Image: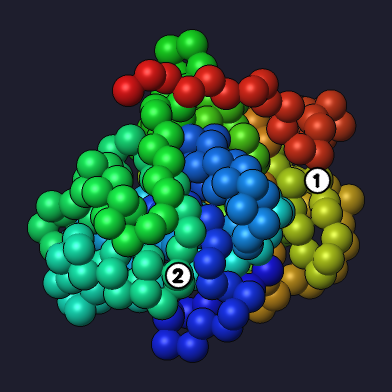
Amino acid sequence: MIVLNGISDVPPAARGGAFAVGTFDGVHRGHQALLQAAKERASELGAPAGVILFEPQPREFFEPGKPHFRLTPLRRKIELFEQFGLDVAVVLTFDAALAGLTAQEFVERIVAGALAARHVVIGYNFRFGKARTGDTETMRRAGNALGFGVTVVPQVGEGATVFSSGAARAALARGDVACAVEILGHWWRVSGPVVGGFKRGAGLGFPTANIALAPGTDLAHGIYAARVYADGRAFAGAAYLGTRPTFDDGAPMLEVFLLGFDGDLYGREIAVEFIDYIRGDARFDSMEALKAQIAKDCAEAQAILDAAPTHPLVKGSKARGQ
């Protein structure tokens, strides 16, 4: 997959394609409907299938001091786009210059100009351009004038569940991993370097690999069954996020005990994939009681992971009428 940081030097192989446009936080099943439509239009046209996205995300640019629960950092988005079989990913730096472009300028300079798009796919609620004045009808009119097709994908969901980034965040905030997976269509994960802790887990016989979560990551506190990726290998794990009420009620830290692993991961990058929520955070009256509970949690995590598929088993999603 070709990944472009900006449009200053677009190779011929990245031009003339069908492009889905958006922020794509989570690359959830609603987003995947846009990507699938882009792939289908690209196949019909004999053109590359691509995506145009913004980094940082517009909300992060306009509210720089407000923590934001980002579901997928850029690197994870690129991984998911590649897994989905896209040919091109165009990453546009969302800064004052881009935010200041009118909707017409955005289309003329970027979509029809630099990328020479032959088709554009957007969601039913897509807004773009200075002060968000552009909408789906704006894009349709621009396409008619400039010679590219436009597909507008309606809201996507299943039953009472709407597939959106906000719904996925809300599910994770209440510890409903199953609902988050239904929305995302993939296991949600975080990654980062392993940092030092207080080594209390090691003292209890359960040494952990600790990751500092990004500000705004509003994940329910408690114990999770997790799959951990380190050094190109996958390990079963029991993950804890909380304030350690038995010890200090300190700042939350993600602590992961890798089941059956014996080694040192300090300073290395790991990814933690959340498979299921086991229980909430709790205070224990003694170290013996805490140690016994951790042993039970690890056994439950192992049982969950033994039964879990490598990829989530989700049903086909349904588009809802506009």
Residue at the far bottom: name it: 9
Do the CB atoms of the residues marked 1 and 2 lie less than 8 Å apart? Answer: no
Task: Please tell me which residue lies in front, 50 or 72.
Answer: 50
For label 2, the residue is 116
Where, quadrant-wise, is the N terminus in this rendering?
A: bottom right
Judge left or right: residue 320 versus residue 60. Answer: right
For label 1, the residue is 236
Q: Earlier in the sequence, mark 1 or mark 2?
A: 2
Where, quadrant-wise, is the C terminus in this rendering?
A: top left
Q: Residues within 10 Å of mark 1 (few under 14, many from 20)?
A: many
Judge left or right: residue 141 versus residue 57. Answer: left
Above-or-below relation of 8 to 252: below
Q: Can residue 84 be seen?
A: yes
Q: Residue 252 placed where, x, y %?
A: 43, 53
**Real-space Cα separation, disc 1 to disc 2, in angstroms:** 46 Å
Q: Quadrant of residue 67?
A: bottom left
Amino acid type, label 2: Ala
Judge left or right: residue 34 versus residue 94. Answer: right
